[in-house]
Every structure is written in structure tokens, then in C-alpha cells.
Amino acid sequence: MELLQKLSSALGIPEKIGTAVFNILYSTGARLRNVEEEAGRLRRTEKRIRTLLMDAEQRRFVDHDSVKLWLRELRAAAFDVDALLDHLNTMTAESRMAAAAEASRKRKRSWPNVELSLRQRWELDGKITKINEYLDEINKGRENYRFQHGDASRTAQPTQRPRYLEAAAHHDEIPIGRIEEKEKIVRALVSNTGMDVPVISIWGTPGIGKTALAQLVYGDPEVHKFFTDKIWVWLPDVCDARVATKKIIEALTSQKCELLSLDILQQRLLELLRKRMFLLVIDNLWAEGFQFWESLRPSLIAGEKGSKVMITTQDERASRTMSSILNINLKGLEAEECWQILKAYAFSGRSSRDQHDMELIGRRIAGNCQGSPLAAKSLGVLLSESNGQREQWENILSEMQILEEDKNTNTILPSLLISYQHLPYHLKQYFAFCSTILLGVEFEKDELVRLWMADGLVKSNGRRRIEMEAGRCFDELLWRSFFETSHIFPNQKFRVPNLMLDLARRVSKYESLTLDPDNSQVADHPEWVRYATILCPKDEPLAFDKIYHFENLRLLKLCPTMKLPSKQVPSALFSKLTCLRALDLSYTKLDVLPDSIGCSRHLRYLSLQNTLIKTLPEAVCNLFNLQTLDLRDCYGLMDLPEGMSRLVNMRHLCLNLDWDKVTAFSSMPSGIDKLQSLQTLSRFVVVTRDGGKCNINELKNLKIRGELCILKLEAATDDGAMEANLSGKEYLHKLLLKWSDDTCTDEQQLRIMESERVIEALCPYTNLNHLRIDNYPGRILPSWVEKLSSLESLDIISCPRLTQFSVQTLRSLRDFRIRQCADLAVLPQGLCNLETLRCLEIDGAPNLRVSTVDILPRNVSQLAVSGCDALERWCLQEGADRVQQIPDKRIQFSHW
């Protein structure tokens, strides 16, 4: 104190002021030293906030506007706390990594046992102080609203997990109601109209059951017997004749169609449908113009007389334009039919006595479903969790009646809102996140799961992978009809039903918005907005500055109507939106990503799928938290940044490409083996051991799942291939082994033998589903191929020295392709016994001999032959009768 007096006197500062300044400095210093302790208190506060929000959600009906506002402010505060704590966790983890990277020598620090710099502490202290002040202000209102932890649990029992099997997410729809409509459609389908491609249409409002009725007809035994081929396609809301034709081809062939010209697409479809008696179902048709049907129709008339088209649509004009023999205007179900659907789900596995006791209440609930089978099903699933408790059924009926009197429900069916309100809290968060999905847009399960993970919604219990935990929640929402499946090739995709999407947008309207140049939402509180989807207009520059004031965004997704004209994302984007956890720039013309991407330290999900990107800035390697980097279909991508090994939280490095396309991707940085959390690594380029890049032995300890494409295998050794440990990767289902194009021109015997040793050492786990071997210079296939009992597709491409092999034991094989195997002498042994085989393609095997009449499996439905003189001759002569029975056959006769 005496020292303070002397210092104050020397500086001419009055003693009282000097004491005050000292106290402030001391207090600030104490806070800086104890910033971790302050953050710990804040972490505990966040947990209490989350609990309080969960309790509020359990109440289900909060009527007072001021209470609703207070809860929104509390939720916004929870997001702010989460961002701050994530910032602290990131800085701490990065500091530890930096320390671990140094030699094991210890250094004295000015802050004992602390890894943060003074600048970092000062920054955190300011943010913590600001948040605490905000929380104190919010907390003052808590007593006024009488919100106490546990209130909700006394008023509403927590929802139990549904009683369903793992496969229940794919449960067949229960065919109740629509008997009259179904019979009308079936009669029309199997009748002989004498018309070219007659059309039946089903139209009606969203959620009324159009698709369910079409599926009911599609699976009818009489329909199945009448048509030799049935084709189902679902069309997006914006769809022209070219896209529709392409989707029909893909549904027919179960292969991706790369044709672009409408004329060529029409010709290909015409060839596929020639002489086939087919039923084509076009689900979700929106095209109103006469031109659409006139562009599609010429390819369809190639089918046999009796072929027909059935469409479902919400648009009456589209229905009237296309229908020619039957136009079904689908109305709501009768109350009795709704009850039957509800009862089937609500009493699944229960006794008839339970049904009798609850029937009166159940019928009243069904009567409030407004004829929607979607509503009846979702309520039935909800009621099935009540364990037969009458009080819960009565509560649900009471809640429906309250909602029906609420003018704010707008077009949302009260029954769907009830289904949402009775979801467990975590499922509500998952579903509300789906407000970012656009109407009619399809998505993959893994894609949504990874976005949930990026947003921090998924909490793992430690017993399961976090992806598995999120996947179970996805299946649960699918079972409850919050999602629906689509029938799109090549991967299973999903949609949010229109009514459910309206519901998602309603429950998240303060946190999620869609920016459309024609009709943008207005955000009263931009600081509350956490999720933004931007519709990018065609041929117009995107005004990024419009989104800068939404500085708390956690997700930003660009949705170009076509390829986004703007080629470069501005650097300011990442310095303005510092809270981003997920950024989706897919399907744009983006070719440069700015270095400022490294500022997005919270980023967990970065999608650049199908862009023009060639290289990634080294700053990407500063994204310590990054879990998913999606580079699918980036054919211009040449390499990855050198510092990728620093992304230790990476789980999914998606480099999937069409295996038949040429790619510029030439090497991978070393250190991939340090990414111990990595599960998806769909493309791997081998280099020589002294090449300074990533070698094949770095695959050893990686627990890779799904797809793996290994390129430039001529650089691998058999020791390295063995060390890669493919046999230990039990969740790897799709494998491509590829040598470079010029490898097979090397006639050195030593190289040939080395390739045979390498491929033998690359033995995968036995449950592999898809295998492709490309440009392999060896003479024999590895012995492990015949042990792949689960193999569904096998492609042997450009293996000119291969002379013969066996498929005798591949009892699950469905698709088999042989291309450009010039020395192949005979058809694979056991081919004719593969009863599961559906598609067979043989091209470029001029030395192939045919020594038996019965060479084709009996269930083959697609056959393509070219460049094979002996096999072509057999198809024209001895096997002509058998070939004529195959619906889809393409045989190019070389010399006949």
C-alpha cells in the first residue's frame, strides 16, 4: 500500500483515484487469471438454460406473448454461450496440440498451468462479461413467469422411445381406405384402350395420400402380372422434359445417366422401352405446360400397346392437361378410415380389450384428422407410446381441440402439431433444423446426419458412434412420418412432406429464414437468426452483403437455381460470419475459396460438392473442428492441402467421383494416418514410399466405411498393400482397385508378377458388396474374389492379360460387367448358375469363345454385348430364343 502511495504521488494522482485504479487492475487481473473458472461457471449455466428450455417445451402450450419472448431470448443466450464455450474449447485444444508438437521440453509460463495467451484471455473475459450481463437481465424475468426447473415434468410425462424394430423406419404403409379409387385405377390400367400411352392422373392437396394410393396400385398383383416392366420416378418441383427423361432412364437401368442432349436422351429412352409393356409412374408432377408432355411422349410410344402412365400431382391444371383415360381428384378420408389407420398403428401388438376401452376417444381423435392419412398415421404412432393409458389419450384429444380454436395455427393441421409437441426434446431440435430444407428437395440420410452433428445437436452416450446415434433419431422421425422416402437412383434419398415442412418452418421461424430475391423473409430480430438458406437467382450476381448482418449464423446454404454465376466467395464473408458451423456452397461455379475461410474456427461442415474448385487454400487446415469436407464430383480438384494432418477431428473426407470419369486428382498429402477419427475416405492415391506423399500403408489403422477407391496401384508394394489392412475394414462395402492407364503397356514380367502380389495382398473383408478392378496388368484374379459371398456387383475393366476366372461362389451377384479384356478366352466359370444375376454386360473381348448353349442365367433382365464375335454369333443363332426373352438387350453386331 505504501508503494501505491509513492507511485500515485510520483505520478501526481490523488490517493483515492490511485486506489480505485489499482482495484480495477487487480480485479481485471484476477478475472484474466481465472477465465477458465469463469467459463466453467458459464458451462454450468448453459446446462441449466437447456434444462429450463426443455421444461418449457414439455409444457407444450405457452400462451402469454411475453413468456414466449422471454424464452426466445433465453434460447438466443444459450446459442451465444455455446459459441463462446466452443471458442474456448478450440483455443485450448489448439494450444495443447501446439505444445505436443514441440519437443518434450518444459517451459516456464507466466500463468501457472494455463495454455491461453494474454490476448486470448482478454478476448474471452470481455465476451464472458457481456454474456453474464445479458443473462442477468434475462434472469430478472424468471420469477415473473414462474419458470422453475422441473415444472414441466410435473405437468407432462416424458415421452417414451417408440416400440419399433430397427427396420421399422421402412415399414410398409397400411392400405386402409381408397379401395374404390384403387379398383378404378387398376381396371383402367389393365384395360385395352387402343390409345398410345394413355395417362391416369391422381391429384389433390398435400398429405392427402396421393403417393400412398399410387404405391398401393403399383404393388397390386393384377398390375404386376399385366406389365412386364414397372418404373417409378419422383420429379422435383422445378423439372423440365430433359431432367424427367434422364430420371426415367436411370430408373430403368439402375445406372447413372450422363447424357445431356434431350434428343439423345429421347433416343436412348425409346430404345430401352421398345417392345416393352410398361407402367410408368411419375410422382409429384408440377409441369403444367403442354410442351412438357409433348417432349416426353414420343419416347414412350415405343412400348407395346397397353403400356400406360400414371401421375400424381397437386396441380389440377397439370392433371387435366395430361390425363386421357382417368382423372382422380383425391379427397380426404372418411372419419372411419382415419380411425382404422390410427388404430392400426396405435394398437400394434396390443390386445382387443385395450382397443375397446380406448375406441370412443380414438374415434374422436381420428375425426379431427381432417381426412389426412398422414395425420392419422403420425397420431397413431404417438398414441402407441401411451402404454394404453386413457388419460394420455384424453390429453391429446384436449390439446387438439385447443389448437383447432387457435387462429395462429394457419394451415398446419392440429394433429401434426400435436405429433411434434409430443416429440422428445432432442427430436424436436432435429426436426426444427429441417426448416433449412427447401420444398421438394431430396437429401441423403448421411448428409442430414452430418449437418446435425455440425450444429452440435447430437449427443453421444459413448456406447455408439455419434453417426449411429443420429441415424437412429433419423429413423425415428422417418417412422413418425416427419420424413418420407423417395424412389431415386442411385442412392436412397428422402424428403420432408410439404405439410411437415410448413410445420418445421413454423416452429423455427425466429431462428431460420430463406432469402429469396423475389420474396425474402423479414427478420425482426436478425441477431436470433441461426440458419439461412439463400436462393440464388439464375444469371444474377449474389449480393453477399445482404447476409452480413446475420452475424450469428450457424448454417449458411446457397441454393442455385442453376450453377451459381458468382465464381468467388468474398473474403469478408468469413470475417463477418464468425459463428458458422456449416457452410454449403454445393452446385455452384465456385473455383476459388478465399484464405479467410481459416477464420471460421467453429466450422464443422464444409460442402463444395460439384463445384469448379481446383485447389483448396492451406488455411482450410486451420479449421480445427472440421468434421466433414465434402468434395464429391469436384472433377477439377488436383490435390489437397499439405497440412491436412492437422484436421484431427475430421470424420468424413468425401472425395467420391464417378469411377468412369477422368479426374485431375493426382496425390494426397502425408499424415492421413493421423486422422484417427476418419471414417469416410472415398479416394486414395498411392505414391512410391520415397515420394514425400501419402503411401498406402497409412491406411493401416483407419476405420474407413462405405466406399474406397485406390488409384495408381503400380506405385504400391505387396508389403505396403498387406500393411494397409483392408481385411480389417469390416464396414467397407464398395472398393475400386485401379492401376494407371498406361500400366498395361508395360511388358516386363517382373511388373506383371508384382501387380499380382499387390492385388492378392489387398484382400478386403468378406462382406464387400461392390468390387471393381480397373487397368489391372495381371493374368489372374486374386483368390479372395471367390470368397466375397455378399458381392452384389463385379466390374472387370481394361484387364487385357486376364484369360479366365470363376464366379461360381458369388451367389449374391446382381450386376456383372466385363469390358476391354482382350485375352479373356472363356466366359467366367459358373456364370450360368448365378440365379440372382440381373444385369450382364460384356464388351471388348474378341477372343472370347462360347462352348455351351446354356450360358445365360435364367433371371437376367438386361444384356449388353459388343466387340465379342463369338458371343454375338451365339446371340444371333443358337441363343436367339433365349436372348429374345430378355426385356432390355443391346447387342452391337460387329460383322453380322
Image (spheres, rainbow, N blue to C red):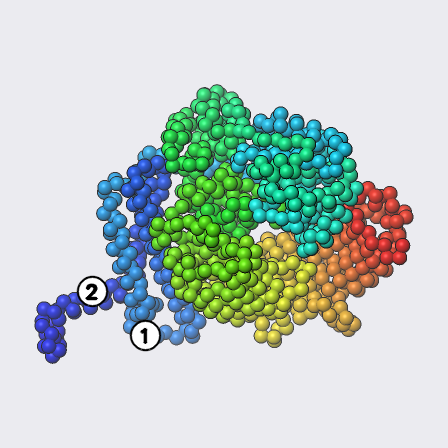
Q: Residues within 10 Å of mark 2 (few under 14, many from 20)?
A: few
- How far from the left and from the top, in percent, is residue 326? 66, 31
Q: Is residue 400 visible?
A: yes
> Can you tell which quarter of the image residue 85 is in?
bottom left
Please state which amino acid type lies under the numbered disc 1: Lys
Q: Is residue 465 visible?
A: no
- How far from the left and from the top, in percent, is residue 56? 33, 41
Seen at 47% across and 58% down, the residue is: 583
The quadrant in which the C terminus is found is bottom right
> Can you tell which quarter of the image residue 887 is in?
top right
Q: How many marks?
A: 2
In the rendered image, which residue does mark 1 sit on?
108
N-terminal label among 1 and 2:
2
In the rendered image, which residue does mark 2 sit on?
27
Seen at 56% across and 56% down, the residue is: 562
User: Is 140 rendered above or below residue 338?
Assistant: below
